[in-house]
Amino acid sequence: METGDFAVPAPPALPERLAGRYTLLERLGGGSSAEVWLGRDEMLGRAVAAKVLHRHLLIDEPARGRFEQEARAVARLSHPGIVAVYDVAADEIGAVMILERVPGSSLAALLRRHQRLPTHEAVRIAAEIAEALAHAHERGVIHRDIKPGNVLIDENGRARLADFGIARVLGEEASRLTAAGTITGTLMYLAPEQLAGHDVDPRADLYGVGLMLYEMLAGDPAYRVTTPVALAEAQRTPPAAVPGLDPVLSGILRGAIEPDRERRYPTAAALAADLRAWLRDADRVSAVAAGTPTLTEGGSNLRRAVGRSWRPRWLAPLAVLVSVVAAALLVTGLAGNVPGRTSPSPGTSGSIAGSATPRSGHPSPSGTTRPSRTPATPSPSPSPSPVYTVPPAFTDAMARLRDMIREGQSSEAIGVRAGDELLVATREIVKNVNEGRVGQAHKLIADFRKTIADMEREGRIRDPAFAERLRQAADELKATIKS
């Protein structure tokens, strides 16, 4: 569905109207077997995308078979992350597939403009594609050509998977329209088993998702090669590490692009769950940290792995490392209370040693009496500044609110961009609560409720019941930080 990778044949002479109802308006792009037009369904009065098989391929049975196979494969699927097929028509004049029109651009075009994407956005896009693939895989459909050119980003920022032109339907021998050992897919995004011409399973699609995530984060493809031999050689070693990437996210990425598919993520659902968990933990960390952390600082919470039967290989060593460091810090902190060490001066407040040491001739816990140590020139200790303690209930309520927003984005109860705007607003609330500005936090929550009402009125929140749930969650959040 993307131009630029190959020579596109000249547009064929097409009739003004296809199948008696579809008018072609504007050519959008083309590939080696078909071209895509913006069209209009005159019967239903709506814009559509028309994928038209090149006229010279009408007599090519394998090409025409793959075209019809794509329609059958996508017809099995109904998911907000997959571009829908509305109709298929074929005769001696032409073959056309009528698709859902998705205003926006491809992920490939987005990467050409920006080179790399913010971490949070890249992870969200990868999670949405993994969720779409989980739906397809559960219905026996393997895409086999996951790449940025086959991912559309709609006007709300949601990722949509397109072009199932070489998809395979598991269990259907008729879907094997390529000879055994034939390499299918786009070179730079082939899984090692695809490159070797082996039979593929859904894990090949996960490898493609991992390569896309790498490219969104690094700003460059994992393997920039031009021949299968060069790719096979490059895949012997992992791609260069993404500088500054959170270690947990780095582990998720490695689990997706593992060359050995037996050690790769087992399912798209497992990959999607880990990506969504990373996004949630990024928000949870920001809810308890001072200020607003960067996105790559947010994924260090290892609770995300609890309760799942499968864990990436990197998780156990990382957990051990964290435990060792924590133990070392604990020992260092307790060292100040070991007998024989010098204790802080009596005027020091807030330390364990200072609070445990009697200041005058009062009995100590052991029953002995220590002499009073009155300084020659008394100097009053400064009064400590009041410190606002963030209520644990606030942290929990904020996590629930953010989870609710992300679930609304996934179910399309709220647009992706609208949901992202609300998430940004929650970070401002968190920042003010962490700094003890409770009054300002209350004002921001009131503004948050007003924004919900505005989005509902503008149609950016599509489900009134969801809007009411958001308002209730905001009220619960406010109740946790009463002055």
Image: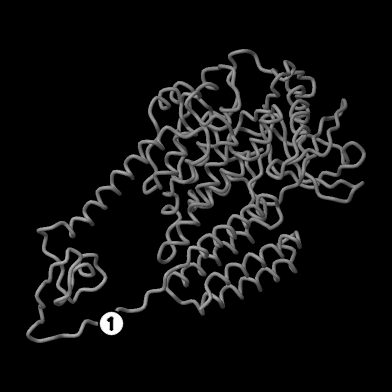
Q: Decide if residue 475 is on the left or right side of residue 95.
A: left
Pick whichever, 279 or 349, lies toward us. 349
Q: Picture coordinates of residue 233 (x, y %)?
A: 41, 23
Q: Picture coordinates of residue 196 (x, y %)?
A: 51, 18
Q: Relative to 259, is 247 above or below?
A: below
Q: Decide if residue 384 is on the left or right side of residue 40.
A: left
The quarter of the displayed image where residue 134 is located: top right
Pick whichever, 81 or 71, lies toward us. 81
Q: Picture coordinates of residue 205 (x, y %)?
A: 58, 31
The quarter of the displayed image where residue 236 is located: top left
Q: Picture coordinates of residue 90 (x, y %)?
A: 85, 29
Element marked by disc 1: loop
Residue plotted at (16% across, 66% down): 367
Residue plotted at (64% across, 13% down): 179
Q: Relative to 408, is 53 above or below?
A: above
Residue under circle 1?
383
Which part of the image, by quadrant, shows the N terminus? top right
Given the image, on which type of amino acid does mark 1 rest?
Ser
The quarter of the displayed image where residue 476 is located: bottom right
**Crowd band around label 1 with a 10 angstrom C-alpha radius: few (<14), some (14–19), many (20+):** few
Q: Is there any visible trace of residue 211 in the rendered image?
A: yes
